[in-house]
């Protein structure tokens, strides 16, 4: 079955709209992600996780904005940053369009921390305006709660470190170059991953990695993704769609 809106004809979408209850919105970024991972790591993971969730809940995956609010990383080549105001406007109008099409349930798979504020504003406003139900995760801040048994390094959830490398190895092994993965020792360790701040990564790493990217494995990535997708699907089916 097709789950991405972009891949459906209008008649396929009309038919799916009769049974699909939830729109799943990927959100990510195009930014430095170590020497061994692609610039699009965040959006690649967001899109794939959204598709895996859609398969479990009969959802529809919305089109996505493939860049994000990445201003703290613009000193690295290839990072593309847009403003929070632009993100807010695009996601707000996207949700308004899906509401016009009859949808009231939205789940955002967000893989980029600094997209959180504009997305939250949009979702809350849509709840007040349209009465939608919603959920949102920051994927990299979400996975520590159910993966503590997996990691070997001291900072597994650092940027492009053990956790991120593992997830990319599982989902997109052809895009990962472990031969140039770095272990970047730095005095900076983010002990508060759920708290939003702005870290200038270039002050702490010259590789774009914060932590040990060499510890990533396919198996760790598989377990992480499977646990995360199952938990999101449970929330959608037993809260949002009730």
Image (tube, rainbow, N blue to C red):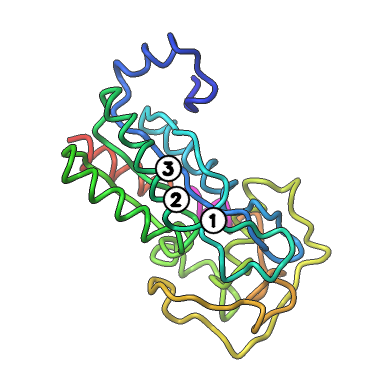
Residue matched to label 1: 82
Q: Residue placed farthest to the bottom in the image?
A: 187
Res 14 quadrant in image: top left
Looking at the rendering, the stretch of residues picked out in magenta corresponds to 221-228
Disc 2 is placed on an element classified as helix
Residue at the spot 46% in from the left edge and 63% down from the top edge: 113
Q: Are circles 2 and 3 on residues that touch, CB within 8 Å?
A: yes
Q: Position of residue 131 (x, y in %)?
A: 16, 39
Quarter of the rendering containing residue 20: top left
Above or below: residue 172 compared with residue 191:
above
Element on which disc 1 rests:
loop
Please rate how many residues cluster around mark 1, counting C-alpha atoms within 10 Å: few if below 14, some from 14 to 19, many from 20.
few
Q: Residue at x 26, y 36 (%)?
A: 105
Instruction: Tell me the CA gap for discs 2 and 3.
Output: 5 Å
Q: Nearest the camera: 219 or 7?
A: 7
Mark carried by residue 87: 2
In primary-sequence order, the first of circles 1 and 3 is: 1
Task: Identify the residue at horizontal 40%, vertical 72% (top origin).
Answer: 196
Residue 224 colored magenta? yes
Please, which residue is most extreme toward the top here?
A: 11
Q: CA distance from mark 2 to mark 1?
A: 7 Å
Residue 240 located left or right of residue 195? left
Q: Closest to the observer: 146 or 3?
A: 3
Query: Observer-nearest residue: 59 or 147?
Result: 59
**Mark toward the start of the polypeptide (2 vs 1):** 1
Distance from Cα at disc 1 to Cα at disc 3: 11 Å
Pointers 2 and 1 in contact (C-beta within 8 Å) = yes
SS at badge 3: helix
- Residue 162, percent from left and from top: 62, 68
The question of residue 10 being in magenta is answered with no
Please rate how many residues cluster around mark 2, counting C-alpha atoms within 10 Å: few if below 14, some from 14 to 19, many from 20.
many
Residue at mark 3:
90
């Amino acid at each position: 079955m097709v789950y991405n809106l972009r891949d459906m004809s209008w008649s396929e979408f009309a038919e799916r709209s009769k049974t699909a209850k939830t729109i799943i919105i990927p959100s990510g970024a195009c930014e430095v992600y170590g020497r061994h991972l692609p610039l699009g790591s965040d959006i690649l993971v967001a899109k794939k996780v959204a598709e895996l969730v859609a398969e479990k809940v009969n959802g529809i995956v919305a089109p996505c904005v493939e860049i994000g609010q990445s201003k703290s990383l613009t000193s690295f080549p290839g990072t593309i940053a847009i403003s929070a105001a632009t993100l807010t406007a695009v996601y707000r109008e996207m949700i308004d369009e899906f509401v016009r099409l009859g949808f009231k349930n939205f789940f955002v798979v967000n893989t980029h921390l600094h997209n959180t504020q504009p997305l939250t504003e949009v979702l809350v406003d849509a709840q007040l305006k349209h009465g939608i139900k919603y959920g949102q995760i920051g994927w990299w801040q979400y996975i520590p709660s159910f993966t503590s048994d997996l990691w070997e390094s001291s900072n597994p959830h650092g940027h492009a470190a053990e956790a991120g490398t593992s997830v990319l190895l599982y989902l997109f092994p052809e895009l990962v170059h472990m031969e140039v993965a770095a272990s970047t020792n730095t005095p900076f360790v983010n002990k508060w991953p759920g708290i939003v701040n702005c870290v200038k990564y270039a002050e702490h790493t010259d590789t774009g990695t914060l932590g040990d990217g060499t510890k990533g494995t396919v198996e760790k990535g598989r377990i992480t993704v499977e646990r995360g997708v199952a938990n999101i699907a449970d929330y959608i089916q037993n809260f949002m769609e009730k």
